[in-house]
């Protein structure tokens, strides 16, 4: 009975944010994640790493051990540990904690840095708990609703890029940087999205003419995702219908102010 | 009678996607198109072509022969072959199949690669059959409806580009890359569409001042196509309410499918 | 009487587009403008000018003489010649016709080329006559209505650019191209509008950090003009109110379907 | 009594713009700010500073003294001087006036230039007084209302930038300019916001492939702030109709100021 209580209290601290202890836990965690990400960044700057490399390693070990303890506690105090372990955040927690241990065995495992950067994703969980992201729900819903349209759009953009990229490869050739079709397609995407690095740029007259057409096309095309998302937002932020279901005909999606079912006239 | 049946079955497999065979035919075709486009791309990378050139040629011959068979079957099993041959997809099918045969007679016909890339367009036909693109209809309709407005807009952008390009040519001159008026117009479009390669960039103070004005202009102008398309989308996707008024409580703005007043339950 | 008639007929041909002759006149004029602009462009390409310079000069003289005749005829056949001469298009006609004559007296007057490019603006008059630009009215109205908001917006962008440009000048210094505050402001506008040439780019860590902030700011700011214009478009394309004026109370702006004045109840 | 009057009159001239003197005061102040900002800019151009450096110093001293007098007068004539001194504009006034005095003691205090550029902010106060910015209120309101959504959006963009920047650092390495993770994140933001300097650009095939994905992502993401702001604008500027229903003909959707039914002329 007492052990149950202990686990329950731990659960409240780790997984919830209603108690003072729970809030402190989240704040400490946020701080540790921040320090950890800062370490990943600073280690990559050669001049800083040369001076403070040893300090960074010590700090990284401390943080890794703290995250490991947190990971174990999360498993201990939850009722269905396996469900947590194989959940999205469970996996993120695991692969963002383990890199340092692995680097102990496999010297110089460079790629593991990326996994440590994933710790940043854990911030979303904490924010979710404190309900800061309540505002984000509407955004997410709007993007979700326009998912299919955006996919169709991206697919069309990709096809256009492949065909225009091939044409530009034939027109420009290797001298101005269009050394292969994949590279030409890369250039077309750079141009169509109005990024325009300039690492590859058309040099011939015909190439510059075609490039101008692609730019104007891209300039017009950018209107499409904007239009899609804007309309979705507009729908979302209009007077909401609620999720009431008519007890007589089971129709849902009633207006908020509705008092009678619009389908069968039953009082709601 | 039997021959008719045979043709009809073939038609169902090739042109439709309701039967299992028809679906498999589409999937195989999609796969072949994918491999074919991958070949076009990889052939253009000099280092890969040097190693696997022979393999690529064999694969390309296999795919070309398969596409040729498909093209003949399409003609055989349709009732009005000429209508297919001169349809949009009929022409695409033809000119995307023939390049390899032509390269047999005309050695080194480089330009034919572009025709092979057109195979990608065939993907649209397959997707149309499986009704995946149902979502795209609304997008297409919105773009079609705002066609005239967008043309007027593009025409205005072009006139602005020509005049500003001429002025920049006079202001900057050949040293900073503005070697001719067409090239200056190219630069103006690069700037106005916010692409900004940097292969040509103003070096004089006056040139940089004018460039700043052009950028801010372009920044504002991008709002126009976005506005046009968004409004069209909004029109398309508006959930319709009608202007019926309840005879009992005088409430209006009922859904189109409503049969009872949502406020008092009176039959509409 | 007869002279009057002759003038009237000429007026119909030149200023209107209802008769067959009037339409032909417009088409010939469009063609001449097109050739003229092409000449301006080709002359500026050194390699082409070297070969065809003499031909270009002859063609330019022919076109200039034709435009001169047109200009005189326009003055002759109109009732109030002075009003035309000092109208927007009257001035454009004059300064786009005169450059060649001036170059006869002042050898090498380079700047005059820009005036010749202004001929392109005359295209708008022709298009206006054939009522092609009817669609453009709505666009123009929307932009006109949001004029004040857009000016406030551009003014804010400029102030932000000056302050951020000054800060970047202090942070980066001359080595990475930030040689003076005006040039830094130019760079800030290049960045804020997401053009990004790369002719000037921050090299220090602090500079790159500030640049990142400016980019994200610019990325968000672009939403503002788009929002303004979209909302204006939406207003314009909604159910229109008409210009009827109530005979009783002189209120205007009635709905199209209105049968009674909304202000005094008078029948419209 | 007289002194009071004198102070009151001064207050009206300095803080208000209803009297002729008040308007002239604002115009002179606007002019001085303009000259002052122009000085800051021109001083930074080495070639101009070399010639006119002495003149600039004299002008700067004159303007600084005028601004000092203005600052003292503002304190003298207001009822609660401390409230002004610690207000937003009070602080701006102080730190934009003091740099020249400080440079007298600390030779070569370069950073103080930035403070002088802050004078530009004072323009906003003057414009506020003459009610020019009335139009801006709606813009500000719309941006304020979508503040939380935009913060969530920017936060998401930053997290995406950190993770993608880390991956690009691992993929590309130091040769193509991705020398550290912070620099890679800088590049990711440059790409995601479609700025695209080209000072750092991916050179490997995998890097260019990932860059293409980031660009298309950025191209789609730009729709989000646009959508948010547009919907807010639309809400703000909606022409209000009310829900009154005519007691005679049951027509609804009347204008707010309507006193009679637009359909049947019945008094509402």
Image (cartoon, coloured by chain):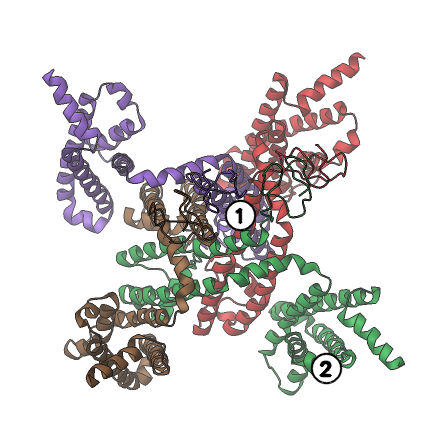
Chain colours: A brown, B purple, C red, D green
Is residue A165 among what the camera can see? yes
Q: Quadrant of the C terminus of chain D?
A: top right
Determine whether the residue tagged by mark 1 lies in a helix, strand or loop: helix
Identify the chain of the residue marked 2, using the numbered disc in the image. Answer: D
Q: Position of residue B143 (x, y in %)?
A: 44, 38
Q: Nearer the viewer, residue D127 or A256?
A: A256
Instruction: State left or right for residue A37 relative to residue D236.
Output: left
Instruction: State left or right for residue D143 relative to residue D264.
Output: left
Residue position marked by numbered label 1 in the rendering = C230
Q: Residue at x 75, y 23 (%)?
A: C77
Determine whether the residue tagged by mark 2 lies in a helix, strand or loop: helix
Is residue A112 among what the camera can see? no
- Cα distance, mark 1 to mark 2? 45 Å
Classify 10 Å Cα crowding around label 2: few (below 14), some (14-19), many (20 and above).
some
Name the image quarter holding residue A172: top left
Instruction: State left or right for residue A163 relative to residue A206.
Output: left
Q: Quadrant of the N terminus of chain D?
A: bottom right
Instruction: State left or right for residue A63 relative to residue D245.
Output: left
Identify the chain of the residue marked 1, using the numbered disc in the image. Answer: C
Q: Position of residue B133 (x, y in %)?
A: 31, 39
Residue at the far right in the pictured view: D2
Classify 10 Å Cα crowding around label 1: few (below 14), some (14-19), many (20 and above).
many
Q: Position of residue A20 (x, y in %)?
A: 37, 82
> Residue D81: which disc?
2
Q: Position of residue D105 (x, y in %)?
A: 65, 87
> Residue D68: which disc?
none
Q: Is residue D94 above or below residue C247?
A: below
């Amino acid at each position: 009975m007492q052990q149950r209580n202990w686990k329950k209290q731990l659960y409240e601290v780790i997984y919830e944010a209603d108690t003072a202890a729970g809030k402190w836990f989240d704040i400490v965690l946020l701080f540790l994640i921040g320090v950890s990400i800062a370490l990943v960044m600073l280690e990559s700057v050669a001049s800083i790493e040369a001076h403070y490399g040893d300090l960074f390693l010590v700090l990284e070990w401390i943080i890794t051990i703290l995250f490991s303890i947190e990971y174990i506690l999360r498993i201990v105090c939850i009722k269905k540990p396996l469900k947590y372990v194989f959940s999205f955040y469970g996996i993120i927690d695991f692969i963002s904690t383990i890199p340092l241990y692995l680097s102990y065995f496999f010297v110089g495992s460079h790629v593991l840095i990326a996994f440590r950067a994933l710790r940043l994703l854990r911030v979303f969980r904490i924010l979710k708990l404190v309900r800061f992201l309540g505002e984000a729900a509407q955004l997410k819903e709007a993007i979700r609703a326009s998912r299919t349209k955006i996919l169709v759009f991206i697919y069309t953009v990709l096809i256009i890029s492949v065909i225009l990229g091939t044409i530009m490869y034939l027109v420009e050739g290797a001298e101005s940087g269009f050394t292969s079709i994949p590279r030409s397609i890369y250039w077309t995407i750079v141009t169509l999205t109005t990024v325009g690095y300039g690492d590859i740029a058309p040099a011939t007259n015909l190439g510059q003419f075609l490039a101008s057409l692609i730019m104007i096309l891209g300039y017009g095309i950018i209107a499409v995702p904007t239009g899609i998302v804007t309309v979705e937002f507009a729908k979302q932020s209009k007077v909401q219908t609620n999720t009431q279901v008519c007890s007589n005909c089971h129709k849902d999606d009633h207006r908020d102010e509705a008092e009678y079912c619009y389908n069968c006239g039953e009082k709601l």
